[in-house]
Amino acid sequence: MTVLQISLFGRLRCTVDDDPVGGMEARKVQELLTYLLLHRTHPCTRESLATLMWGERNDAQAKKYLRQALWQLQSALDAACHPTIPLLNVDAEWVEINQSAPIWLDIDHFEHVYETTCQLEGCDLSGEQVDALCQAVALYQGDLLEGWYQDWCIFERERYQQMYLTMLDKLIAFAEYTNDYMMGVHYCELSLRSDPARERTHRRLMRLYYLAGNRTAALRQFETCVEMLNRDLGVEPAKSTLLLYEQIRSDQFGASDVEDLPSPLHVESESSDLSDILVHLGHLQATLRRTLQQVQRDIERVEVLIQRHAAEAPANGQQEDAHRTVRQPPNISRPA
């Protein structure tokens, strides 16, 4: 079966067997396809599509241009895919993507992973979920439809960017929870590439550098944070960021020893950031789990010793009675 592959992250790409689909060079045809894909879960009315795409025209002209664009789009898809079922469902009032059509869509896989992990924290992710998140963020080859500035596109672009940053946050939290600091650094860098002034990510990257043993990089990251905040937002770092910087500069950041409880000062410094607090709680949970496991092992050892002592006690009692019998002096009656 021929599968139409469409990528909306970065530049629009439509291919079949790695060959670009021809006949879709017109920008309005591309806009029509991408809008239908972004709203693929429900049909769109012809009137709404005509108004959206050709709002500057009168109704008759807008509907005429929509008919032409639909014809060009269907012709291009049919010529490339030779589908046994139509890729578009079109009638006199409605237009929609056929949900049964053989289409691979990057945002569809991206959304599915987001929806299946959005209620989970980084410390709760399974290995399969982590792999799925890694694959999903790898699909994000750039912001949605880069170079497009229609209002509907800008809204969708920001929505997908927030989904992307949320998934990166989960991977970063998982990496910190499992002490995989280099993995955490990698995903922090991807996050900052998408949003350079994201202060919470700068803080996480500072922590990860420090935990990985690179205090110099952690301090330099603070300087980068200050620069990006000033350049993009015209603000100074938050108190939590400044406090974390002072902890690292004075080498008093206590979370580096995983056998000890994380520093209460660290919790206070991150109290404004729910995700960071959850990371801290993850460390507490891991420490408590190890402690409980050790307590359970000690209890089992004590129970074994008690059973062994109870089994040996009767034998020891009999031996003691025998010793007492041997040592007991004979009963000699005194003369009257």
Image: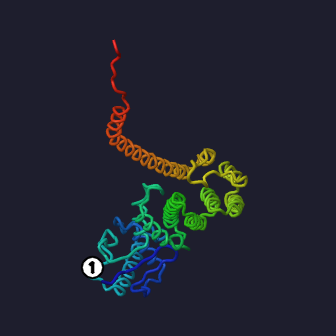
Give residue 9's position: percent from left, percent from top. Answer: 49, 73
Horizontal placement of 193 versus 5: left or right? right
Return the residue found at the far front: 335
Q: Nearer the viewer, residue 183 or 8?
A: 183
Examine the rendered structure and indicate whether residue 22 appears above or below residue 124: below
Return the residue found at the far top: 336
Examine the rendered structure and indicate whether residue 311 appears above or below residue 186: above
Q: Quadrant of the C terminus?
A: top left
The residue shown at (45%, 76%) is 7
Give residue 246's position: percent from left, percent from top. Answer: 71, 51
Q: Nearer the viewer, residue 55 or 305?
A: 305
Horizontal placement of 114 versus 278: left or right? left
Give residue 259's position: percent from left, percent from top. Answer: 56, 52
Q: Nearer the viewer, residue 32 or 123?
A: 123
Horizontal placement of 330 versus 246: left or right? left
The residue shown at (29%, 78%) is 86
The residue shown at (49%, 62%) is 167
Residue 307 lies in quadrant: top left
- Mark 1 highlights which residue? 85
Residue 238 in view in this figure: yes
Q: How many marks?
A: 1
Q: Secondary structure at mark 1?
A: loop
Give residue 159's position: percent from left, percent from top. Answer: 49, 62
The residue shown at (40%, 71%) is 37
Residue 79 lies in quadrant: bottom left
Examine the rendered structure and indicate whether residue 229 appears above or below residue 318: below
Label 1 Cα neighbours within 10 Å, binned few <14 / some 14-19 / many ≥20: few
Examine the rendered structure and indicate whether residue 264 appears above or below residue 173: above
Q: Nearer the viewer, residue 256 or 140?
A: 256
The disc labelled 1 sits on which kind of residue?
A: Ile
